[in-house]
Image (spheres, grey):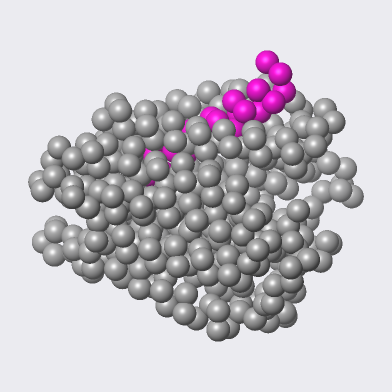
Amino acid sequence: MGLKTRLIAMNFLQFFVWGAWLISLGGYMIVTLNFTGVQVGSIFSTMGVASLFMPAIMGIISDRFFNAERVLGVCHIFAALLLLAASKITDYPTLYIIMLFNSMLYMPTIALANTVSYNALERKGFNIVKSFPPIRVWGTIGFIAAMWIVDFLGWTKNANQLYVAGGAGILLGLYAFTMPKRPPLKIRDARSLANSVGLDAFVLFRNKKMAVFFTVSMFLGAALQITNLFGGAFLDDFKTMYPHSFGVQHPNLLLSISQISETLFILTIPFFLQKFGIKKVMLLSIFAWVLRFGLFGIGNPGNGLYLLVFSMIVYGMAFDFFNISGSLFVERESDPKIRASAQGLFMIMTNGLGAFFGGILSGWVVDYFTTNGVRDWQSIWFSFSGYALVLAVIFPIIFKYKHIKTDIVE
């Protein structure tokens, strides 16, 4: 295979592993294992805990001691074995521990896979900026493919989804050892721990504009995984009212529209940033989250299916206009010397602290509106929508930023 084809296969499997369980595991835990909202939320929050420090630690290991592709392979193999072990577990404490260790091994592989890809492309003389995005989009395709496979096989509410993820993880782990070598860096080129976790970027908090941006990012990051946590369980609760509806029969297929929308909205980011600037783009993202949750609140898999589909489409704007545009803003506003650290700090605030608190608090909200095992989903989704609406009101008031037409993303 050519290099790009090999990298496409690696990125496809990288996110195939995640897509096999990320969207449907919440439904499995609530519907089949009868876990509470807080228990489900806390298990998903392990990704936030792991994102606080494990990508930095594995990054240092690959920078200083071992080839990045080998670290990537080892992480995937052991993470996959943990997923296979998790398929046999039905009690919350044990499953929490296993998924915590899985997150500690899987979350760093996202950055490691990028490192391996960048290194391979650069050594072959490719332009990374032009060559990598068409390769990376196959990761999203892999995520969607895994969702569809689990759905068509009828495994969204059982542990077989973990077998799919585990099997793909072992395959990817072995495949990673065949990738072009990315040896450790010279000591002078290797990043320090402070640089890797973004500690030296904390100087940006002295800038009020950046301090506000990072703080809002943390609060908005809390919303990123909520529909992934509870979307499957939400649709399953309509099985009595709309037993033969598409959303009940094929929840992953319906939810996958969100990922399809995500791939399309990525392409619109340069236009929106050039036309409106980061403040308005972020505001569009926040209002998109208001709609995302609100449409869940009034929609259903029956005569309200079109509202759920609209919510899935809106998700692309909600996710990309925050995650991708926010990352570009941090890149542009940071001193070149600390840009890598600034990106690390952005990840900590969103996928670390934000995801952790979002998982715990969203689980509490679900339990609060659950009576005798019956969940009041409308109140649950409206609560999340109201949370996003509060952010939408506060953000433009406290974030002072004037967009300059010439200051655009190329």
Left or right, 222 with reference to 242:
right
Left or right, 17 with reference to 64:
left
Tell me what residue is drawn at x 71 percent, y 43 percent.
Answer: 61
Query: Is 27 included in the stretch rendered in magenta?
Result: no
Tell me what residue is drawn at x 65 percent, y 44 percent.
Answer: 111
Residue 271 to residue 70: above or below = below
Left or right, 44 with reference to 365:
right
Give residue 44's position: percent from left, percent from top: 41, 53
Residue lying at the far bottom of the rendered structure: 397
Q: Is residue 286 visible?
A: yes
Tell me what residue is drawn at x 27 percent, y 65 percent.
Answer: 380
Residue lying at the far top of the rendered structure: 1
Query: Is 5 included in the stretch rendered in magenta?
Result: yes
Q: Which residues are magenta?
A: 1-23
Q: Main secondary structure of the magenta part?
A: helix
Give residue 27's position: percent from left, percent from top: 28, 46
Between 62 and 180, the residue placed more toward the observer is 180
Quadrant of the rendering where the N terminus is positioned: top right
Between 111 and 310, the residue placed more toward the observer is 310
Q: Is residue 116 visible?
A: no
Give residue 335's position: percent from left, percent from top: 81, 66
Residue 101 to residue 346: above or below = above
